[in-house]
């Protein structure tokens, strides 16, 4: 009693209806990880919330830094010039530092425009086709393991990334990066919070492979080929 439960559903935001629990007070999610926008998030709750009391004006400095860094990242991915990588990472760090004031700002107009143009059903469908395609290409790799231990989800129910569990994860990530495949390590657990052995093991071994809507059939084939040659 008296404890508010907050559930971060960022990694399953396209499947919100499948993740609603009766004891949760607030659901939060980031939109930046999904749709290539500079800012934006979701707050869902059965509790009474007055948006005008918690939202301030749009943070134009944050959104501009994020938008510029996203554009530089796109340029970097096409030509891999190291100086561009340094610049967009510096801008990202500067933008993230602006969040330390704990102010909740309104969505920027540019991000709102981009979100209004998005076809969610099309994105979900493309992601699920991609993840099923990629898994079918690599599932024969010896000892390959999916990082899905809850329930019996079908592979195409996962629409964020393809999560793999790998020994020597950090070494493998560097090898993939050297071949142009940029993967993510998520759910890193700090030393002070590693009491749960299963959670610590997941944190140390998980590597997420991109499968989002920007990738076509041949992109997924290329990703599969890199994984097969590396793992």
Image: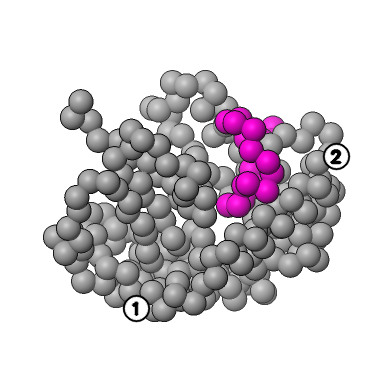
- Give how far across and how far down residue 222 sits, in percent: 80, 60
> Which of the 4 quarters of the picture holds residue 21?
top left
Above or below, 172 against 159 in this view is above
Q: In this rendering, would 181 be left or right of 200?
A: right
Callout 2 touching callout 1 (CB < 8 Å)? no
Secondary structure mostly taken by the magenta-highlighted segment of the chain: loop
Please tell me the numbered disc located at residue 140: 2
Q: Which quadrant would the N terminus be assigned to in this image?
A: top left
Name the secondary structure under disc 2: loop
Q: In this rendering, would 48 be left or right of 119?
A: left
The magenta span reads 147-168
Q: Earlier in the sequence, mark 2 or mark 1?
A: 1
Q: In this rendering, would 109 be left or right of 165?
A: left
- Give how far across and how far down residue 71 sits, in percent: 51, 76
Q: Which quadrant would the C terminus be assigned to in this image?
A: top right
Q: In this rendering, would 163 be left or right of 45?
A: right
Q: Nearer the viewer, residue 154 or 231?
A: 154
Q: CA distance from mark 2 to mark 1?
A: 46 Å
Q: Is residue 179 magenta?
A: no
Q: How many marks?
A: 2
Residue at left 70%, top 52%?
Answer: 131
Residue at left 77%, top 54%?
Answer: 133
**Mark 1 lies on residue:** 109
Neighbour class for label 1 at 10 Å: few (<14), some, many (≥20)? Answer: few
Q: Is residue 35 visible?
A: yes
Q: Nearer the viewer, residue 92 or 9?
A: 9
């Amino acid at each position: 009693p008296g404890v508010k439960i907050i559930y971060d559903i960022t990694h399953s935001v396209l499947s919100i209806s499948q993740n609603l629990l009766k004891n949760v007070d607030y659901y939060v999610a980031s939109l930046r990880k999904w749709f290539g926008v500079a800012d934006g998030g979701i707050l869902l709750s059965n509790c009474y919330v007055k948006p005008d009391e918690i939202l301030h004006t749009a943070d134009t400095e944050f959104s501009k830094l994020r938008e510029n860094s996203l554009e530089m990242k796109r340029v970097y991915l096409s030509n891999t010039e190291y100086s561009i990588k340094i610049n967009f990472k510096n801008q990202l760090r500067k933008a993230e530092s602006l969040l330390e004031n704990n102010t909740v700002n309104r969505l920027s107009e540019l991000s709102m425009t981009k979100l209004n143009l998005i076809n969610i059903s099309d994105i979900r469908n493309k992601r699920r086709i991609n993840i099923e395609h990629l898994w079918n290409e690599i599932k024969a790799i010896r000892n390959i393991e999916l990082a899905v231990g809850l329930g019996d989800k079908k592979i195409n129910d996962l629409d964020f990334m393809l999560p793999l569990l790998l020994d020597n994860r950090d070494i493998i990530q560097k090898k993939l990066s050297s071949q142009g495949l940029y993967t993510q390590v998520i759910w890193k657990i700090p030393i002070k919070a590693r009491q749960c052995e299963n959670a610590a093991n997941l944190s140390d071994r998980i590597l997420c492979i991109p499968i989002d809507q920007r990738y076509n059939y041949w992109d997924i084939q290329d990703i599969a080929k890199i994984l097969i040659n590396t793992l």
